[in-house]
Amino acid sequence: MHSTTSEPPSPATVVGTPTAPLPDSASQALKIAVVGGFGVGKTTMVRSVSEIRPLTTEETMTRAGAEIDDLRGVEGKNTTTVAFDFGRITLDSTSVLYLFGAPGQQRFWFLWDRLFTGALGAVVLVDTRRLEDCFYAIDRLEAQGTPFVVAHNDFGEADHALEDVRSALDLDPSVPLMRCDARERGSAKDVLIRLAEHVRTLVREGRR
């Protein structure tokens, strides 16, 4: 099985049921990074959309960690990812998406460039309470030329218009921006489908 950045299968074929076995015919592995600020919902998204029990690296927040990490807006958070989260979605009989959720704290940002290498694309989750947390991810993805979409994780509560979020992030008009609820499998899957559509468009236009 190998990774590739070639044109992905049709996004409409995104399937997968919980605990689904990997097909014997699977021959193409596609890597997707899920990034964003601390507490934005990356682990939640991987967990909600993965067809297998995801591998997570969540640990209980310690007092020392709370003194290092900025908890503004997420004061109730008591666990944190310390490496990567990992999930899987079968696209069709030959193609599989592997999802990698990255830790959001600034002290782990050095891991992100390696995570982006070889990725088909990325999802940048944003929380409008801590919008500045996603600037670094967007900057690094743009610098590496990795396709990405931005998903405003509002947990079902639309607090800002998407046009305002786009303006605040100074997003290029070609970058897809959508609303999602990372807790909902269907909503998280819609984000991945939008990413696949975006990558296909870039490939067809010769920009990827």
Image (cartoon, rainbow, N blue to C red):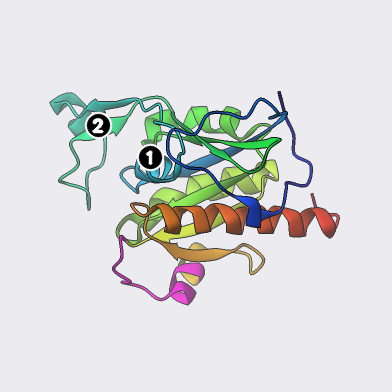
> Which residue, as the protein is rendered here, is positioned at the far right?
206
Q: Nearer the viewer, residue 9 or 44?
A: 9
Task: Judge whether 128 appears above or below 203 on screen.
Answer: below
Tell which tag, 2 or 1, sits nearer the viewer: 1
Quadrant in which the N terminus is drawn: top right
Q: How far is the residue under mark 2 from the one under mark 1?
A: 26 Å
Q: In this view, does 207 lie above or below 39?
A: below
What is the three-letter code of the residue carrying label 1?
Arg
State the residue at coordinates (18%, 36%).
Answer: 78
Label 2: few (<14), some or many (≥20) within 10 Å? few
The residue tagged with tag 1: helix, strand or loop?
helix
Where is residue 47? Give x, y as percent: 38, 40
**Residue 55 is drawn in which quadrant?**
top left
Residue appearing at x 59%, y 59% in the figure: 194
Q: Is residue 178 shown left or right of residue 3?
A: left
Residue 164 highlighted magenta (yes or no): yes
Q: Where does label 2 land, which residue? A: 68
Q: Give the range drawn in magenta.
A: 155-166
Q: Is 7 on the left-hand or right-hand side of 81?
A: right
Amino acid tagged 2? Ile
Question: Badge 1, how many Cα within 10 Å: few under 14, some, many 20+?
Answer: many
Dot 2: element: helix
- Please tell me which residue lies in front, 96 or 157: 96
Where does label 1 land, which residue? 47
Residue 67 pos. (x, y %): 18, 32
Q: In this view, does 61 lie to the left or right of 22?
A: left
Please say whether residue 161 is one of the residues in the magenta stretch. yes
| Count of labels in the image | 2
Q: Which residue is rendered at x = 60% and y = 51% of the image?
A: 148
Write the residue at 15% across / 45% down. 76
